[in-house]
Amino acid sequence: MSKRPRRNHSAAFKAKVAIEALADGKTIAEVALKHDVHPNQVTEWRRQLIERAAGVFGGATAPETPPVDMKVLHAKIGQLTLENDFLEGALTKAGLLSAKR
């Protein structure tokens, strides 16, 4: 059995399929067969539509990822760089690491 290539569906197509899956009268399987997509994909698009529908009307939506504190990340990078430099020097002096790196 050969696999078909990965397809990228437009947002408009996804919305159309999800709305059709929400409408009464057709099952998820029928909608999936009609649009030639997997029933699990139709279920996922339907779930996303339901979750994000409030945002269309100006409702507050929760951010998907919490904001990242860049100062903390830069401090961590500096700390790790310092530790790597220290360990590289110590290993080189001990003869466990060649000086050519």
Image (tube, rainbow, N blue to C red):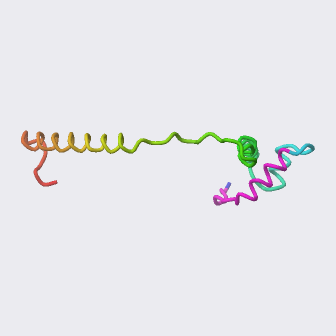
Say whether residue 6 is left or right of residue 21. Answer: left
The residue positioned 17% from the left and 44% from the top of the image is: 85
Number of residue marks: 0
- 71 displayed left or right of 33: left
The answer to whether residue 9 is left or right of residue 79 is right
Quadrant into which the C terminus falls: bottom left
Front one among 4 and 11 = 11
Q: Which residues are magenta?
A: 2-22
The N terminus sits in image quarter = bottom right
- Horizontal and vertical percent for residue 29? 82, 45
Q: Position of residue 21 (x, y in %)?
A: 83, 46
**Most foreground residue, 64 or 3:** 64
Q: Position of residue 22 (x, y in %)?
A: 84, 44
**Quadrant of the rendered structure where residue 52 is?**
top right
- The residue at the point 93 percent across, 44 percent down is 25
| Residue furthest to the right | 25
Residue 3 belongs to the span the image colors magenta: yes
For image coordinates 67% across by 59% down, the residue present is 4
